[in-house]
Amino acid sequence: MDTLQIRPLTARSVVLSTLLGVHPPRLAARHLVRVGDLFGIAEGTIRVALSRMVTSGDLVQTDGKYALTDRLLRRQARQDESRRPRTRPWDGTWEIAVITAERRPAADRAALRQAMSALRLAELREGTWLRPANLDRPRTETVVRQCTFLEGRPEQDPAVLARTLWDLDGWAATAEALRASLTGAGTIAERFTLAAAALRHLLHDPILPPELLPPGWPGDALRTGYERFETDFARLLTSELQP
């Protein structure tokens, strides 16, 4: 885990990762306290984190239970999509987004860049984003308002173009290291920390058509490793964290 440079989870990140990983994302305080105990985090520290997360708008408290707010529900939806991406057969076409809105304030530019990344589009040059048209996902109002979408086919080798747009070797190396570490981890705390890192890493998987990926692409293997952890953690929540 040291080679991956994964920092230990804080009380806030333990709470957040737990709620992002359960469906529905709503748990009683006592259950979150007991999850924190797996990491040696004191009950008072978890409860302070919960209070601060409610104040900051990350959580809502109802009937003694804590749930994610809308912003984090959208994040959970993106994470779920990264684990089970909705793909479609690829015919060689690429989707191209050209920024056509003028005089955009800084907040709009930042929101668009975040939305483009969520759509797994890559920036070819300033104002032009693209990817193979093999994903089925909605475009947000932020994107539709600022961009015009086109379809086309590159004249160059699409696999070469993909490598210029995404660091495929770098992503694959980290994914394989996470998968191996998750498989070999002993304690539930170690697996939890690695699983949270794996889920974050999957958000950056470009989910390209197989013919554009390097041999031995570890995306599906990392997803399988995370699914195993999720199953084990769900059992833990059921058997050990319930009264």
Image: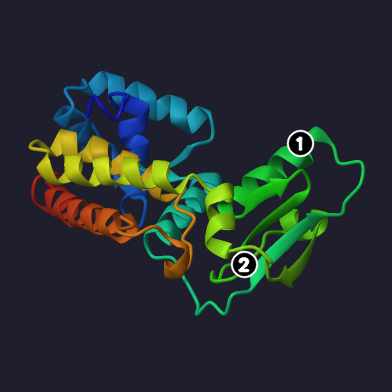
Q: Is residue 10 visible?
A: yes
Image quarter of residue 217: bottom left
Q: Residue at x 76, y 36 (%)?
A: 107
Give the crowd class for mark 2: few <14, some 14-19, many >=20 residues within 10 Å.
Answer: few
Tell how many labels: 2
Instruction: Assign a secondary structure to mark 2.
Output: loop
Q: Left or right: 223 with respect to 208?
A: left
Q: Is residue 152 left or right of residue 187?
A: right
Q: Amino acid at mark 2?
A: Pro
Disc number for residue 138? 2
Q: Specify whether 32 is left or right of 185.
A: right
Give the image location of residue 44, x and y in percent: 26, 19
| Residue 29, above or below 146 | above
Q: From the top left corner, tell me how far across and down residue 180 is, in percent.
A: 18, 44
Locate the N terminus and report the quarter of the image it occupies.
top left
Query: Which residue corresponds to the image point at 45% horizontal and 30% vertical from the top-left?
Result: 53
- Please tell me how crowded label 1 is: few (under 14), some (14-19), or many (20+) other residues with Cα within 10 Å: few
Can residue 119 be spotted in the picture? no
Q: Nearer the viewer, residue 126 or 154?
A: 154
Q: Is residue 89 above or below residue 84?
A: below
Residue at disc 1, secondary structure = helix
Using the image as rendered, state which of residue 78 and residue 219 is in the foreground: 219
CB under 8 Å between discs 1 and 2: no
Front one among 214 and 112: 214
Q: Closer to the camera, 165 or 239?
A: 165
Disc 1 to disc 2, C-alpha distance: 21 Å
Q: Give the residue number, with chain letter if any, for mark 1.
A: 107
The kind of residue on which mark 1 rests is: Ala
- Sequence-wise, the earlier of marks 1 and 2 is 1
